[in-house]
Image: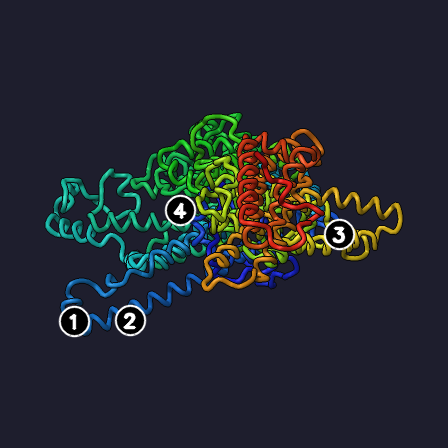
Amino acid sequence: MAPIKPKASRTVSKTVHRKRFSQREQSVDYDSDDELFPSEFATNGAADHDFVDLQNIADRVGKEVDTFAETLDQFREQLNEPNSKRDAALRLCTKYRDYAIDQVKKLKKQNQVQRLHDTRDSFAKAAQDPLFGRAGSVASAHTGGDDASHKTLQQWQAEADTWDLFRAILKSRYPSDQELDAQRDQLKELGEPHRYMNHNQLWQCFVLSNDTAKERHLVLKWLEQAADNESEIKQILSPDQDRKNKSVSTWTNGWMETRERIKGAKRVRMADDMALDLRRTDSSDLLVSSLDPDAPAREGRTLEKGDSTSERSMWMACFEMLRQGKPWAEICAWCVERNQGWKALSMGVATDEQHPVASSGPSSGVLFRRMCLIAARSDATDTYEAAVYGLLGGDLETVKKACRSWNDYVFALFNNLLLSQFDQYLLGFQSLQMPLEFIRKHGFNEDIPNQTSATSTTSSKDLIANLYANHSTSREAHTAFKLVQGSLIANTFHDLCLRVGTAIADEASKDEPSVVIKSVRRSDAGELSEVAIAKDPDALRIVSHMLIMMRFLDQSTFTDDHGDEFDNIIAGYIQLLRSVSKRDITPLYGSMMAEARCVSSLAQVIADNQDARDAMEFIKITQIFNIDAIAVITGQYTYQLDRVLQNRVRTGSSLKMLEDTKEDLYPSRRIKRGALVHELSADDKALVSGLEIFYLVEGHWSVTFAALASACRKLLIDGHFATTRAIVDHIDFDQLSRSKSTNILGRPINVMNAEQVGSVATTQEKLYEVQIMQKEAQVYYDVTMLISAIAALDTWRMVEFEYVHKLPKPASVPAKVKRALEEVNASVEPLLHGILVDAKDDEEAARNAAIRAKYLPEIVIAYLTVLSTAGHIVSRDELLTAMDISTIVANHERSALRQAFVDAGRMTELVTMFAEVSKVMLKLNEIGVPKRNKKERGGRALGIWEIYG
């Protein structure tokens, strides 16, 4: 995945590892089986109320990520308690659900306040502008709030519903020992089903003895609650909803328009006994001749348009109340208030007033459900009327016609399956339930909806899969939240996670290969629909936390065989947290992944910290979660190093610091001024900062110097001299050695300083220990020497230029010039005797040779130009030093200096430079030697280089 540019955090990211989530009042729970099995059951059933380019969506993430992390940390700690995984998971689900509910309540209140303000402003505008009042109603002047806030409210409600479903599913599929014991005790108390058992007890036996029925019942209950929540949201968000409700609520006088037409006709034809053949006012359809409730169905006629619309609205309202699981008493009161008590009676005959009408469960008998089934299929004149009776009778086709959402279709399917399953269960008691005459007349077996041998075993997975293919539900079914909810209902959450992990990998590798997201594509099936989850930050957060819980709760299912897919989800969520600068909570999630995946993900996170001390704070957090901090640091420097090496075109060029010149002061060549001035990129600086962390971490001598050696080698080979110089400047070898050696030797020393080594290596054992440390630090020390020599040469050029061009000419050579020359001599001398000459294998030896070939020839030739120039302005002795280098190149095999020139193809250039230096010596001899002892440095004199003809 491409690196994410950190977004300015809206809130300060907090450390979560010890903070406690505040206790809050919880909403409706499923902890008691009394809700599943009430003492008195409704006639028609009882119901319980139980990646990606993440940068583009980062703005949608709020403080919920902090809250979720805090509670997840508590969950992680609770896992240490015996037999606590399931209970801890349920508590965590409850907290997540309650957090979402809190957000819903808050947004509802905000929307209500906004609507009041909008209404007030509208009335004020209407009062001031008469044209406004005539142009439209005041109510139409406001929009009911901002569309963005509406979408947020719906999103939070969907999340609350999803957590509610997840909790119910967990509770059902992973029952505790106590719950299983209680279930067995209850079944034992009920005894075997028999012909004299009442309906409530028979229903309890059915559900308690069948896990499929119990889960279907819970899904229906969840769907009812979700429908109720959705209805409340619609009332808040839709400014027209209140007017629609008011229209239905004020319709209390029956079929007014039809009645007036019938009365008028009868007054005109009082003596006529012939049936009325009235037509609708707006069409040629025949009107009913009476006002009996069943007249439209019995006569096959219609009502006036207004009455027909009102009748449809009434049935629609009844369907919605049944769909929401409203108790019969509430539905009855609603119908009676509108003078439609017969509707309530037809829906809830002998129903317990306190329990939902449409819920699956024991009715007054199968007869009532068969009556509703017949009414739905043959007698109903309206889609919603048929759907009402279809729900009561357990029909599917008539209910599907009234379905408008994915939830509605799932409700229709599960209601149909559960009632069919219950009726199959009752077949063993049919002589007790229905007269044989009724069975013969209506064909009992044919009329049981979907009554086949496969009904009780019909897979929820197949039902949900059909909704993906159904053109009416396909679009909604492939949205992020419905994908999650569908997988929970179908018991395919494991498969969903596999596909989400694959989708995240596909998204992450679109532009370039990802560092932290593994490619897991196992087939070329095209884009997965689960990419919707990968692109939705809320859905990704939900699935990530559900996955974490399930990996703890059901390790046999969520095995390591698909660990890469699962870890892709967590890694994707970590990338999301990176994008919103919530880095401090990422170690918590990293600890939930495989070790290697954790290290690679957190390595990117720590790489975002441009300040090394901030990175150290991050490292402290990783240690709290028992994460290998050194592995993370190593991973981040490797990641940064790869970025530095990839961001530039590999030129393979050697060090270039010389230029040709014809000035007599120089031997035809000289060092370019400013040759080493290069602007560091952001990636360069990040790499330097990342390596600085090693300096701040206590101990870890071997790892530190291995990392520095590896980084510097690769950078130098690739020509990134400026970056290497920045590393050496920021991580001084002497200081680093002192800080790291204390833990090993008991005191801080520079292991390359013979005097300091002698002070601690008082025993053979200590000496051996120091020698190992020297060997491990040798590469970085040699690189430091290399960089120091190049820097000294560059400094000399600046000082020398200033001296040569200074007017008036100084009477003597300034100390600054002499000091610069001394620094050059001191820095270059170690290089002449060999650097990077020891290697552990052939590959390392080849890399060392490549570095020597790239840099040593340029340094040595530059050094010769410095000595030649110094022979003019400081002392002619420097020319002798220059000529001595030829001996070193020729005779010192270990220094590998000659081989470096050969490998670089610059031996001829070196010989030419020696010749140029010789010419300078001859010219200076022609000028004359000062009147002083001709014995120069080492007892030598320039005269030995004179050529006699």
| Rendered location of residue 331, percent (x, y) | 41, 54
Camera-nearest label, 4 or 1? 1
Q: Earlier in the sequence, mark 4 or mark 2?
A: 2
Q: Horizontal placement of 141 versus 71: left or right? A: left
Q: Residue type at mark 4? A: Ser
| Type of the residue with mark 1 | Asp
Q: For the residue marked with disc 3, what is the amino acid?
A: Asn
Residue where numbered disc 3 is placed: 753
| Residue visible at 65% across and 57% down in the picture | 17
Q: Separation of disc 2 and disc 3 at Cα? A: 84 Å
**In the foreground, 899 or 549:** 899
Task: Work out how far the residue at label 1 is from the one at label 3, CA to CA, in angstroms.
Answer: 92 Å
Label number found at residue 120? 2
Q: Determine whether label 1 and label 3 are within 8 Å by CB.
A: no
Residue 458 visible in the displayed image: yes
In the picture, residue 28 is in which quadrant? Answer: bottom right
Name the residue beneath numbered marker 1.
129
- Residue at 71%, 45% in the rendered image: 777
Dots 3, 4 in contact, CB < 8 A: no
Which label's residue is closer to the chain start, 3 or 4?
4
**In the displayed structure, does residue 86 sit left or right of residue 286?**
right
> Around disc 3, counting alpha carbons within 10 Å, would you say few (fewer than 14), some (14 to 19), or many (20 or more)?
few
Q: Give the distance between the C-alpha atoms of the residues marked 4 and 2, in whole angstroms.
A: 44 Å
- The residue mark sitting in front, 4 or 2, is 2
Q: Earlier in the sequence, mark 4 or mark 1?
A: 1
Give the mark nearest the N terminus, 2 or 3: 2
**Sooner in the amino-acid sequence: mark 1 or mark 3:** 1
Disc 4 target residue: 346
Closer to viewer: mark 2 or mark 3: 3
Numbered disc in front, either 1 or 3: 3
